[in-house]
Every structure is written in structure tokens, then in C-alpha cells.
Image (cartoon, rainbow, N blue to C red):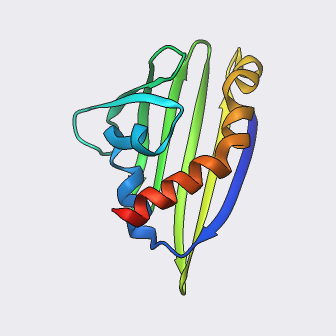
Amino acid sequence: MWQANFQTTTDVPAVNLYRAITDFNTWHKWDDGIEYVRLIGDAKTGSAFMLKPKGGPAVKITIEKMWPFEVIDVAHLPFAKMRTVHKYERIGDTTHISMDVQIWGLLGFVWRKIIGEDQIKDAPIQTKALIEYARAA
């Protein structure tokens, strides 16, 4: 299994970030790499959504766990899976943000190159956009 992590801090409260990240159908408003997200049912553990990246096919993603202030989802890729963990922890006047990406499976090494490494490389830009979106909400 391959895994990587990105961390940063912000003054935006964890509750605002959590509210923004769990509003799945609006991800395209702050992430330029997403064409659309369509939540199937309610936003809760066990639910699924379809995510269509720009220039790529739609991918089914399952919400593995969801509770304040953490969301874990698993993308179902051909012959591999990718888990993404978003955590927001408020300490004093600062919110600590952590994003973990894990990829495993028969073709995990391929998906690491296609998606995983770019996810971590682009994490600072995506997180900054999420912070600004959550700040304005």
C-alpha cells in the first residue's frame, strides 16, 4: 500500500471546513479539477457519490466514515482502491488540517502514478481553495 499525507493550519473554524467538505455536491465550486459530484442519498457513513474529474471518467466513491470533524471516503478504481481521510482539529485559534491518501490493490502502483501523487502535490492548492470557500460560507 502507498500512502502520503498533507498538513497545514488555518484560522477558519473546523466546523466551517467540515460543513464545506461534507457538502459533496458543491466540491466543484472550490476544486477546479472536479467537473461534478453527485451524492447518492444522504451524506452519511455508507452512502456513495459519483465524482467526475475534468478530463476523466466518473468514479464511484463510498463514504467509509463521517463524523465531526473527519471524513473518510474510498474511491473504487479498476483493480485498486483509494482512501482519502480529511481531518480538522481546532486547537485554540487555529484549525489543524490533515489529508491522508492511501492506495492499494492489484493496480495500486498504477493509480498511485495516475492519481495519488497528483492528489498530494495539488493538496496545498485544493486546501487553500477549500479554506477560502469555507471562510465565505
Residue under the point 45% across and 73% down: 13
Residue under the point 22% across and 34% down: 41
Whether residue 3 is situated above or below residue 40 in the rendered picture: below
Residue under the point 57% across and 42% down: 84
The residue lying toward the viewer, choosing from 49 and 132, is 132
- Quadrant (top left/top right/bottom left/bottom right) for the N terminus: top right
Left or right of 8: which side holds 25?
A: left
Q: State the count of labels.
A: 0
Whether residue 70 is situated above or below residue 79 in the rendered picture: below
Q: Residue furthest left?
A: 41
Left or right of 39: which side holds 124?
A: right
Whether residue 6 is situated above or below residue 43 in the rendered picture: below
The location of residue 121, given as percent across then percent down, is 74, 41
Left or right of 13: which side holds 105?
A: right
Residue 79: which quarter of the image? top right
The residue lying toward the viewer, choosing from 111 and 131, is 131
The location of residue 122, given as percent across then percent down, is 68, 42
- Quadrant (top left/top right/bottom left/bottom right) for the C terminus: bottom left
Whether residue 80 is situated above or below residue 5 in the rendered picture: above
Residue under the point 45% across and 17% down: 58
The location of residue 131, given as percent across then percent down, is 50, 60
Left or right of 44: which side holds 89?
A: right
The location of residue 22, given as percent across then percent down, is 36, 50
Q: Residue furthest bottom?
A: 92
